[in-house]
Image (cartoon, helix red, strand yellow):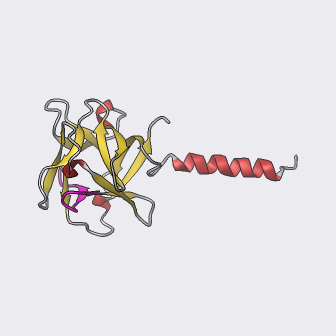
Amino acid sequence: MFPISLRTLALLGLAATLAVAQEGFAGPGRYEIVNVKTGNAMELNASDLSTVFQSSPRGSERQRWEIAASMDGYFYFRNATTGRVLQVKTDKNDSPVVCAQFDGDRDQQWKIDTTKDGNVTFTSRLSGKTLEFGAGAIVKVSDAKGSSANQQFTLHRLGK
């Protein structure tokens, strides 16, 4: 058996930490967004390029989202296929989210918070409502429900 140096142990620990950092929010970059409750990914509808729905993760370009910093701790979610951004339609509960042309308004800005379990939630700057996966394939916003799994997501970083 070969002795392991403290430097080797430290490097192994760093490598393990970096591997774990690929999950969760690690700053701006490209991600797949998966709901904790359903296991489905957020996807842009190919036929109208506006509707956002949930479907099984399959590595589709329409399931890839570029998360870019906005201001004051908020972010934009830009679809990798079209460059259109996630936008809340109204400030009412159960309002669907869509993808729209970028204009930088408050309805396109989202706050990302980490839960105690290491998942993330997304809150609209406009409405203060939380993104959630509803019944069927619906992606919408509604009042925050604390630890509700349909309002929690995992982020899988794609690439660097």
Query: Residue 48: percent from the left, percent from the top?
Result: 13, 32
Query: Residue 124: percent from the left, percent from the top?
Result: 24, 56
Q: Which residue is rendered at x = 70% and y = 48% of the image?
A: 12
Query: Residue 151: percent from the left, percent from the top?
Result: 29, 59
Residue 118 is left or right of residue 83, and the answer is right
Determine the residue located farthest toward the bottom in the rendered image: 146
Q: Which residue is rendered at x = 53% and y = 49% of the image?
A: 21
**Residue 6 shows up from this direction:** yes
Relative depth, front residue between 35 and 68: 68
The number of numbered discs placed on residues in the rendered structure image is 0
Relative depth, front residue between 82 and 62: 82
Residue 6 is left or right of residue 158, and the answer is right
**Residue 40 shows up from this direction:** no
Relative depth, front residue between 72 and 4: 72
Q: Which residue is rendered at x = 18% and y = 54% of the image?
A: 135
Q: Is residue 117 above or below residue 18?
A: below
Q: Is residue 94 above or below residue 56?
A: below
Relative depth, front residue between 79 and 133: 79
Q: Which residue is rendered at x = 26% and y = 39% of the image?
A: 43
Q: Is residue 35 magenta?
A: no
Query: Residue 100: percent from the left, percent from the top?
Result: 18, 39
Which contiguous range is marked in magenta? 123-136
Q: Is residue 125 above or below residue 19?
A: below
Residue 50 is left or right of residue 155, and the answer is left
